Image: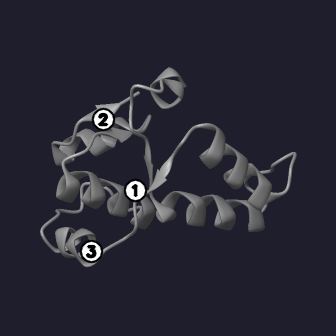
Amino acid sequence: MEIITDRANEVLLSPASYWEIAIKISAGKFRLDIPYEEFWRDGIEVNSIYILPIELRHTNQLLAMPFHHKDPFDRLLVAQSLADHVPLVSGDPALDAYGIQRLW
């Protein structure tokens, strides 16, 4: 995706994303052709991605959010987007109900 690979953009990655992928792999819903750690390590390094830690301000944001979306991973990503005023890369239009800037 050009948004992520464009060096002019600072790309942040939430641990919620790699946590969700790990769960999907272990449940057999997703498969990688390379080892999980290698996939993330290489992707993070090659694309100069910064890890956005899950912090108290993010989970606090969850308290004020209506349940437009039930998925806990997506809700946490939205909370991080809202709390830190950063856009969220997602193909899920249901997240627009939160008033975030969604890129895709």
Q: Amino acid at mark 1?
A: Asp
> Does residue 31 sit above or below 87 in this rendering?
below
For the residue pair 12 and 19, the one nearer the viewer reads as: 12
What's the amino acid at mark 2?
A: Arg
Disc 2 + disc 1, Cβ < 8 Å: no
Label 3 crowding class (10 Å Cα cut-off): few <14, some 14-19, many 20+?
some
Q: Which mark is residue 52?
A: none
Which residue is identified by label 2? 102
Q: Secondary structure at mark 1?
A: helix
* Figure colour scheme: one colour
Residue 60: image quadrant is bottom left
Q: Quadrant of the C terminus?
A: top left
Mark 3 = which residue? 59
| Residue lying at 43% horizontally and 41% vertically, measured from the top left | 11
The x and y percentages for residue 53 are 40, 67
Point out the residue furthest to the left here.
64
Q: Amino acid at mark 3?
A: Thr
**Left or right of 47: which side holds 37?**
right
Q: Which mark is residue 74?
A: 1
